[in-house]
Image (cartoon, rainbow, N blue to C red):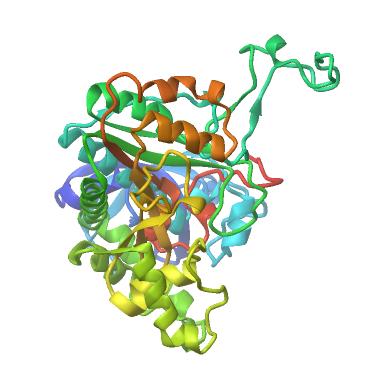
Amino acid sequence: MQIKQILAEAAVGSEITVKGWVRTKRVQPNVIFININDGSVIHNIQAVAEPGIINEDTLKLITTGSCIAVTGTLIESKGSGQRVEIEVKSVSVYGTADPDKYPLQPKKHSLEFLREIAHLRPRTNTFSAILRIRHTLAYAIHKYFNDNGFFYLHTPIITGSDAEGAGEMFRVSTLDPKNPPLNEDGTINYKEDFFGKETNLTVSGQLEGELGAMALSKIYTFGPTFRAENSNTARHLAEFWMIEPEVAFYELEDNMALAEDFTKYVIRYALENCADDLAFLENRLKDEEKSKKADERSELDLIQKLKFVVDNEYVKLTYTEAIQILLSSKRHKEGKFQYPVEWGIDLQSEHERYLVEKHFKKPVILTNYPKDIKAFYMKLDDDGKTVRAMDVLFPGIGEIIGGSQREDSYEKLLQRSKDVGIHEETIWWYLETRQFGSAPHSGFGIGFERLVMFVTGMGNIRDVIPFPRTPKSAEF
């Protein structure tokens, strides 16, 4: 029986067996206390044994990190901190953990240190809480789309196209890197490669997702994506997960409504189903905040921040209106923005957070961005300068969703792809959908790890995925 079930359902007086990992052991003259956790819940369960119940040889093997099974009677706890505990009858040791070598002794460890032992960090309270919340959010995402008539589409991980036109992709090849076949001009002859052409790991499932929407009307993807961007920041990973719904017959306004309803649903689901883990992470953040300067501290506690999103209607305004607000702001006039503000810039996180946290004090959806800073597939506005794009901005993080109404005109899409240097022959199949039964359609992408960061309050994206992949780092 898992500890989560025991704490929620088991009756006092029942005989139970708990299997898990030892967090702490205290030996006193008249009693032995062992705290055990099995990962099913943030809370430990305490096992209490009288002297002689556990023989000395076995007791020596029970150390922090060891794996044991405890059988006994569930009784009301005589001490504070727990409602019930186990009166031990017998203990078995599955696996020992040498206290001189086991790195997770009961003391505070830095997040940087824990990244170096990612194979063990799920055993800590912080990371077990994050991973449970990650699971819950993933389940909520699938439940939301299933309950709203979407079909889950599996898009390819290996692709011959660059959905973003950025070129920062990981190449997939079976050619000998020391002696690849060459064309007459000295370039690599990819016709000799496994797929007969140059291929890469996908940066997005969107283009293939659009194809699904043109037949099934409402689809979503949820899978791994890859960016070969040499960026060592707290917000970037080389391998991460993306959620990308695509919907036929949706225009920009429908897309905004979907994004708002979706984000509110999954965050509300986490609030309702991860209360204990969120409370733990909130207290952890409060302790962290104490070491910061007053003006660097968050105005909202973690749960307040989540409710800030769930309880407020999102403000909708155009990029042009947002630029005007930023230019008129006291912060801009006093030169307090690190990055300049002018029409045509790609807004920085400080600009986005100002709009959300200071000006509107609500989540914000910005629309109609300049075409030159957005992807080729976004539908052109009538002015020829902007596109029907939308970004959803959250407190503390800035952009969390990027999306758009997609260009459904063959001629306009072909011209835009040429403008950004994408060769027609690489996306012929994508262009062809605009020739055979084209329809208005829209969609968006949300990085799963960015969402988990927001919900858990973690400040580094490396701490919300089990085994982060970053430049010069592919351990575990």
- Identify the residue shown where x is 37% and y is 52%: 401
Instruction: Count every numbered label the image shows and give the total.
Output: 0
Task: Answer yes or no: is residue 59 visible.
Answer: no
254 or 279: nearer the eye? Answer: 254
Q: With 41 as the anchor, is 230 left or right in this view?
A: right
444 or 328: nearer the eye? Answer: 328
Task: Answer yes or no: is residue 244 visible.
Answer: yes
Residue 161 sits in quarter: top right
Q: With 440 as the anchor, is 381 left or right in this view?
A: right
Q: The N terminus appears in which quarter of the rendering? A: top left
Q: With 391 as the anchor, is 6 left or right in this view?
A: left
Residue 16 sits in quarter: top left
**Residue 234 x %, y %:** 56, 59
Residue 83 sits in quarter: bottom left
**Residue 378 x %, y %:** 40, 43
16 or 445: nearer the eye? Answer: 445
**Residue 155 x %, y %:** 41, 25
- Above or below, 91 relative to 436: below
**Residue 179 x %, y %:** 85, 17
Q: With 458 as the anchor, is 262 left or right in this view?
A: left
415 or 4: nearer the eye? Answer: 415
- Identify the residue shown where x is 51% and y is 40%: 164
